Image (cartoon, rainbow, N blue to C red):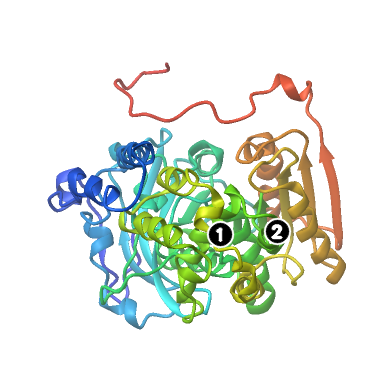
Amino acid sequence: MLRTRTSAKAVPTETSLPSPASSFHGNPDPPLSQVLAKIRSIDLDNDTASAVEVAIGFERSNWAGYSVLSDSFYTVVPENASSATPGSILKVENYMNSSLYTLAPNVALSRILFQSANANESAVPASAFILWPWNPRKFKGIEGFPVVSWAHGTSGWSGECGPSHIRNLWYQFSAPFALALQGYVVVAPDYAGLGLDHDAKGNRIPHQYLANNAAGYDLIYAAKAAQEAYPQLSKEFVVMGHSQGGGAAWGAAQIQAEKHFSGYLGTIAGSPTSAAQIDGLKAAPVSTFSAGLLPTIGQALSSIFPSFRLSDWLTAKGVARTNLLQELQGCQSTRLELLSSAPAADLIVPDWTSTWYLDAFNNLTGTGGKPISEPMLVLQGTADPSVNVTFTDTAVNETCSAYPESQIEYVKWTGVSHVPVLFAAQTYWLDWIADRFSGKGCQRGCTEQTMSPALPVGAYQKELAYFLEYPLYGYETA
C-alpha cells in the first residue's frame, strides 16, 4: 500500500482519489478571450498571431484537467518551504485521478512538492510526479522498490509546462512509461519553475532553462524527497534524462563528484545538452536555432546574474515576443510559432556575443570537461537535428581527456534522430539500469561504440508517428 511517512514535520498529504471537481477548486483558467487579446496586443502579423492562438489552444487541450492556477496542489505551497533544506518533502498527493491522464494500464500516479536548489544553490520548491509499477522489480541486496529519477526534455518555461500537469507526462512510452512497466518507480521532477511556479510567499520561480546544475539538483533532491515520503522505496537510485534532461542527468553526475549523495548508482544521459552546444551558439551565425535558445535561456538569466537584461541579447521585437511567451504561459508549440516565425536577425541584437553572460552561464552550469562520479552511459543518435552528434563528441572527449578515469560508456546509434534514440536504445539502457541495481561494476576509463540497425536505416520509422488521446472504450486498440 502506498503511504506517506508520518513525522513531526506534519507533511501535508492528499490521500483520496480526487475527481476533477475536488482536485481543482473551480475553474479560474484565464479565459481564452483574454489570452487572444494578449496575443494581438503586440506587433505580430495576422498569420503569426493566428498560429500562436492555435498553439495555445493545442497546449491547453493537453492539460491533465485545468490550469495549474486552478489546482490546489500547485497553488497552495506549505509555509515550511521557506526554510526546508534541499531534499525535504513538502507535500504529498498519494493518488492522482488517472482518468485525467493517458497513462499506461496498471501504472499509478502520485505527485509531490519538494525542496530543491537552483543554479546558485539557493533553496527553491519544485514539483514532481511519481509513477508506480504494479509489480516492482526485486534485486538481490536492494531493499525496497528500485528508483529511477527521470529528467524530461524541453517542455517549456512556465508553470503550465510542467509534465506533471500534462496528460501524457510529456515523454510517455519513450522512457517514463517504459521504466514503470519494467518494474521501476519513476520519480520525475518538473524542474523548478515548471508545474509549481511560485514559492510560499507568492514570488515567481523562474525556470533556469539549460542550467544543467540546477536541473541536476532537481533530479537528486526529488529522489531524496520521494525516499523520505515513501519508506518502501530503495535508498539506491539511478538518474536518467534526455535532451534538456540529458544535460540535467550529466549535471547530476558532476554534482555527485562534488557532494557524494548516498545511494546514487549512476547516470544515463540521452542526447544531452552540453557546454559545447551552448558554445556553438557563439560560433555560428545568428539562426533560427539561436533565435529559439537565446530568448529561452535569457528569460531566467537575471535570476542567476542580476545585472542581465533581455535587451543585452534581444531586439525590442525579441524582448516583446519573449515576454509574451511568459505572459501566455506558453510552452513548446507556442515558442515555435512566436520565436521561429520571424527572421532571427529581427530578434537577436548583432553584438550579443560581446556580452559576458553566456560564457559565465556555461562555466557555472555547463556539462562536459568536468569530473563526474559513478558510471555514466551516454546515448546519441547520429542523425539528431536538435543535439548534433559533434557537440556530444566534444563533451565526452573533453571529459575523458581531462579525467581519463571517468567511467563513461558512449554509444552512438546510426541514422537515429532525437527522441527516437530512446526507442532504438531501449533494451540497452534497460539492461544498463538493471546492471547498476544488480551491483555489476563498470571498467575505469571511457569506451565508445557505434550501433548499426539490422535493416537499412531508411527502412525504419524515423520519428514518433503517434499521439496519445483519451480512449472512448476500455478495450480500444485503434
x and y, in percent, of residue 61 in the image: 30, 37
Vertical relation: 65 (above or below) 350: above
Q: Earlier in the sequence, mark 1 or mark 2?
A: 1
Q: In this figure, which residue is indicated by the disc labeled 1? A: 143
Q: Residues within 10 Å of mark 2 (few under 14, many from 20)?
A: few
Of residues 310 and 259, which is closer to you in this image?
A: 310
Left or right of 309: which side holds 148? right
Q: What residue type is labelled 1?
A: Glu
Whether label 1 touches label 2, CB < 8 Å: no
The label shown at residue 8 is none
Question: Where is residue 83, by image quadrant?
Answer: bottom left
- Secondary element at image label 2: helix
The label shown at residue 280 is 2
Q: What residue type is labelled 2?
A: Gly
Left or right of 414: which side holds 38? left
Q: Which residue is drawn at 45% across and 44% down?
A: 170
Q: How crowded is mark 1: few (under 14 residues within 10 Å), some or many (20 or more)?
A: few
x and y, in percent, of residue 339 in the image: 47, 49
- Secondary element at image label 1: loop
Of residues 306 and 438, which is closer to you in this image?
A: 306
Rounded to the nearest angstrom, the CA distance separating label 1 from label 2 is: 44 Å
Vertical relation: 456 (above or below) 86: above
Residue 2 visible in this rendered orientation of the protein: no
x and y, in percent, of residue 465 in the image: 53, 26
Q: Which residue is drawn at 78% across and 28% down?
A: 453
Which of the two marks, 1 or 2, is nearer to us in this view? 2
Position of the C terminus, as image quadrant, is top left
Residue 473 visible in this rendered orientation of the protein: yes
